[in-house]
């Protein structure tokens, strides 16, 4: 093999790797549906998780995780964050079968029911609190269900 042939092969490999690692442009993101905003709490939380893992500003509900630069190692991070946030197991297979926020939200809702949407609503409420407000809530003793706190 000639040195020129090897150089050409290596250059092609570097180009391919560069294309795989390149972040999609904002124009390409818009074309893929990033402007389709999350409609419910579960989609909002999943969209945030996708965006954080992919290091993007935002992810639309119909954007394909893999088209945005996702791969199996990042999919494990998605599964881990979903597990941590919702206390549910998310097999990697589900991310490969439903690689959009919309599809994954639907799959989780089918498996977990209304509980997962309610958990997402609570997570969004907690995330909107300031550190001080969150600290006060944590410091307050929990009252038994149905009973008002004594004054």
Image (cartoon, rainbow, N blue to C red):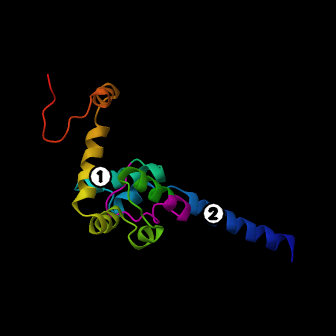
Instruction: Using residue 79 as the reference point, say whether residue 44 is left or right of it.
Output: left
Image depth: mark 1 or mark 2 in front:
1
Residue carrying label 2: 17
The answer, for residue 50, to whether it is visible in the render is: no
> Is label 1 in a helix, a strand or a loop?
helix
Residue 59, picture quadrant:
bottom left
Please state the extent of the stretch shown in magenta in the rendering.
Answer: 58-76
Residue carrying label 1: 44
Give the dominant element type of the magenta stretch: helix, strand or loop: loop
Q: Residue at x 55, y 57 (%)?
A: 22
The answer, for residue 125, to whether it is visible in the render is: yes
**Residue in the foreground of this view, choosing between 141 and 79:** 141
Instruction: Using residue 26 as the reference point, say whether residue 7 is left or right of it.
Output: right
- Marks 1 and 2, how far apart at CA: 31 Å
Magenta stretch containing residue 15, yes or no? no
Q: Position of residue 13 (x, y in %)?
A: 68, 67
> Is label 2 in a helix, a strand or a loop?
helix
* Residue 98 badge: none
Q: Residue at x 40, y 52 (%)?
A: 49
**Residue in the foreground of this view, choosing between 49 and 110:** 110
Instruction: Using residue 129 as the reference point, say whether residue 27 is left or right of it.
Output: right
Instruction: Give whichever of discs 1 and 2 has the lower sequence position.
Output: 2
Extreme residue in the top direction: 151
Magenta stretch containing residue 62, yes or no? yes
Q: Residue at x 37, y 63 (%)?
A: 63
Above or below: residue 38 compared with residue 135: below
Q: Position of residue 30 (x, y in %)?
A: 35, 58
Residue 83, picture quadrant:
bottom left
Q: Residues within 10 Å of mark 2 (few under 14, many from 20)?
A: few
């Amino acid at each position: 093999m000639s040195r020129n042939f090897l150089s050409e092969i290596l250059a092609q490999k570097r180009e391919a790797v560069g294309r795989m690692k390149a972040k999609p442009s904002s124009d390409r993101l818009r074309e893929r549906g990033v402007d389709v905003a999350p409609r419910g709490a579960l989609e909002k939380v999943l969209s945030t998780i996708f965006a954080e893992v992919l290091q993007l500003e935002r992810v639309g509900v119909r954007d394909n995780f893999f088209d945005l630069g996702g791969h199996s190692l990042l999919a494990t991070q998605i599964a881990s964050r979903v597990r941590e946030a919702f206390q549910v197991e998310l097999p990697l297979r589900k991310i490969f079968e439903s690689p959009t926020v919309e599809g994954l939200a639907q799959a989780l809702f089918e498996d977990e029911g209304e509980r997962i949407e309610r958990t997402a609503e609570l997570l969004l409420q907690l995330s909107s609190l300031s550190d001080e407000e969150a600290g006060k809530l944590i410091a307050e003793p929990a009252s038994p269900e149905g009973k008002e706190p004594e004054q």
